[in-house]
Amino acid sequence: MRLGVNIDHVATVRNARGSNWPDPLRAAILAEAAGADGITAHLREDRRHIRDEDIEALMAGIGLPLNFEMAATAEMQTIALRHKPHAVCLVPEKREERTTEGGLDVASDEARLADFIAPLREAGSRVSMFIGHDPAQIEASHRIGAAVVELHTGHYCELIADRRTAEAEAELAALRQGAAFAHSLGLEVHAGHGISYDTVAEIAAFPQVMELNIGHFLIAESIFRGLGPAIEEMRRRMDAARA
């Protein structure tokens, strides 16, 4: 199972002072040295963390695959087609949200999204849909030709943090069923959002999940441990859970 490290919040810290530090590219290089299998970066419409020049630097400066998270807009499609990253992950995006809330509603926008991802696929990028575990969204992602679905684990992680154990178990079961269903359709299954040391084991244990994308927790933990050790510990817990 692969670990993708999301470096968005290195840029958040940088932008808080309007300086050049800390550098997201340096974080990506450190993540690679610590055992990450890929780098994730979300270029938002409002550029609140990752900026256009960060994508330029990452494409030129890292040896790992780049997972380019973006909204399904004409502007972002143009940027993705210019860079041709290894993977493009379509996410819902609202200007007023603090972070991505819930999964993309593929089923209600199927025709547009099928047309939207076609040139990205032709350019050689693997297209992933960031969705919830609803079977209708999984089926729609399959129908439009996505190669991957990334299941939104944020609600499960919030329930664990709030110690709402019964609800968390139900959400985990639904995620497990969603992963199995997506795999049965031939989709590659990823998972991400809100994952910490306290929640990674249960999600990493899903046999269908091929990749976890983790960012905010690792950047936060790196304040105390350093980025390399924080990633190494996450990798250890992932591998132990899978074993």
Image (cartoon, rainbow, N blue to C red):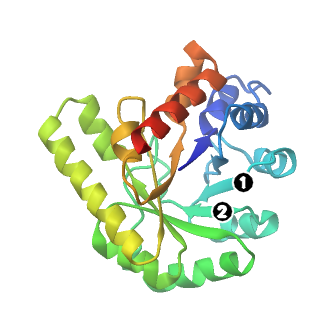
Furthest residue to the top? 224
Taking the image as shown, residue 9 lies to the left or right of residue 135, namely right
- Which percent across, then down, holds residue 94? 47, 54
**Between residues 15 and 35, which one lies in front from this camera angle?**
35
Amino acid type at mark 2: Ala
- Which percent across, then down, holds residue 47? 65, 46
The residue indicated by pointer 1 is: 65
Classify residue 49 by image quadrant: top right
> Which residue is located at x 25 percent, y 49 percent?
172
**Between residues 243 and 13, which one lies in front from this camera angle?**
243
The local secondary structure at tag 1 comes to loop
User: Are the residues at dot 1 and dot 2 in contact (C-beta closer than 8 Å)?
Assistant: yes
The local secondary structure at tag 2 comes to strand
Say which quadrant the C terminus sits in: top left
Taking the image as shown, residue 56 lies to the left or right of residue 141, namely right
Amino acid type at mark 1: Pro
